[in-house]
Image (cartoon, helix red, strand yellow):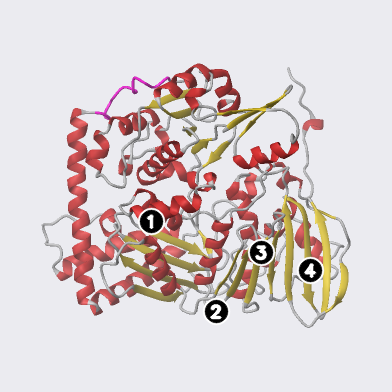
Amino acid sequence: MSHYSQEDIKVLKGLEPVRKRPGMYIGSIGKAGLNHLVYEIVDNSVDEYMSGFCTKIMVKINEDDTIEVMDNGRGIPVGPHPTEKKDTLEVVFTTLHAGGKFNTETYKISGGLHGVGASVVNALSEFLEVWVHRNGKIYYQKYSRGKKVTEVEILGETNKTGTHIKFKPDAEIFENGDIEVEGQIIENRLRELAFLNPGLEIEFIDEKRNKKQKFLFKEGLSEFLDYLIKKNKKAPIHESPIFGKGSFKNPRGENFSDIIVEFSMMYTRNDYPHIFSFVNNIRTVEGGEHESAFKTTLTRVMNDYAKKAGFLKEKDPNFTGEDVREGLIAILSIKLPDPVFEGQTKAKLGSKEVRAAVNDIVAEYLVKYLDSHPKDTKLIFERIKEAARARISARKAREKVKRKSIFENSPLPGKLADCTSNNLDESELFIVEGNSAGGNAKTARDRNFQAILPLRGKIINVEKHDIERLMKNEQVANIISAIGTGIGENFDISKLRYGKIIIMTDADVDGAHIRTLLLALFYRFMPELLKAGRIYAAQPPLYKFKSGKFEKYLYSDAELEELKKEFEGKKYSLQRYKGLGEMNSDQLWETTMNPEKRKLIQINIDDIVETEEILEILMGSDPSARREFIEEHALKVKELDI
């Protein structure tokens, strides 16, 4: 029997738990978690704005991967803490669950809820510095990996107030030591915050991309909606947007402030709905009680009104939620005290008290709009009826195909080389470009947990074909059968056969195109796989560099140029891999498939609007827009691939 006693019980002190299990606090140790560090600090500044003490925020990404966030709020409190026997500033940055958000008099509404934001960022940073302008003085303290390096010092006097934080994410924590945050995604988030907080000025400086912007919006959600519609590049079907804002008495009692509900929405010619929901400025990408209530209320009100106004006859079946949401672009923003989120990263709201508030306010303003805009109302219901007809037609097409049948009780595709493991924690499916590369991959793989599905040529473009054509395509059918979840409304993630689905294509233009076609398929018909972090792109090497006994695989032209400088004046040989089929199976395993050495990019959809825009460019019918995009991103392979 193995030894197990009191000595084996470890107690993690201070910020050790954060460094030991960072994913519990920031969601992941990939790019999404890295970006989250910036959000945590910025959210604290936005909370100062919502409390009426801040008007400007500056966010800067420096060339050396340090991040700076500065605001003109009250400044973090300083001075001896009444219970912790250390300076309050140090308590905030070195103690979990320490902050002003637990005091409802200090922050009635806040996004940074759990009192862990500043301390978590500190714990996961190589260093963090903070300057506080308060009480006419400038206070300073420095930390390293969650521990103080200096005591709190007074650097001088000032007539300003506010907080300035500078930190560098710790390469020891994040995947492959990569600590470069995604400037474009940070920019999108800051723009969102400016839309959600009219009158707040946010300056963004990105030295990496040589970009400087200021965001300041007076009209809030109406400007946000207009921006989304223009980005979406799909024409609205009615002239006036639907807007509503109201407060609802908090059912939790008088000690809690009212729940504020604000929404703005418009129907467009897009085939897909987009609902952007926020709680106290935090994007709830997985929705929650507020978004569910919005969808339920929208469906109920539209059906009730359609019957009353004669758009639906008594014998007609009700519109489904799918019908009333098709082509809808909507923004839902909730402000409430002490919200309950599922997980520290606040991706999903669990506070059930918002349901009544959303139902009441959305129903009131939606009916008012429909009553007062008869022309727009008629166009909206024509759009909904069109969606209902298309849904019924698509269902019949699916049933027709099923009878033939490529999905219903179908065997796994013949070209699939399956693995023996059915454990999602270890099983992987490689979708490989070409039969030649597929053969190499089958030889190279570890058959215990790695399955191979080779593709012959390019799959169908899902942006240009209807679901009936899609389901008849052999390549798509093989992918769907191998994954096992089904698609669209029949998707069931519990039937997923592999924990990782890895797209493995050549590192060239054709490979990038196939990768994009596959991502479009997942995004449109199996988005839950992307949200769950199940989709990856393999990174095969571009070169093999050899000088004497020194050998190294290189994955980018930038790596090659750096190595050339290092070996300047020395003899070396260089092998350029034009495709996966050119590698022998040992090389393919060593560079691209071995979990201990390979480089995988996890695909996520942090910014839905940006994803939509890129898909429209790459898959749409405008060749000039596609050419401009490719020319601009030709040297940024990683950005193009994802």
Q: Which mark is residue 625?
A: 1
Give the residues drawn in magenta, as a range.
406-417
Rate crowding at label 4 as few (under 14), some (14 to 19) or many (20 or more) other CA atoms within 10 Å.
Answer: many
Amino acid carrying label 3: it is: Lys
- What is the CA distance from the residue labelled 1 to the residue labelled 3? 30 Å
Quadrant assignment, res 151? bottom right
User: Element at badge 3?
Assistant: strand
Residue linked to disc 4: 131
Q: Which mark is residue 273?
A: none
Rate crowding at label 3 as few (under 14), some (14 to 19) or many (20 or more) other CA atoms within 10 Å.
Answer: many
The rendered magenta stretch, by its main secondary structure, is classed as loop
Residue sitting at x 73%, y 70%: 163
Q: Which mark is residue 199?
A: 2
Query: Is label 3 or label 2 in front?
Result: 3
Amino acid carrying label 4: it is: Trp
Q: Residue furthest front?
A: 569
In the image shown, does 67 or 289 lie closer to the viewer? 67
* x, y percent for residue 73: 69, 75
* x, y percent for residue 23: 63, 45
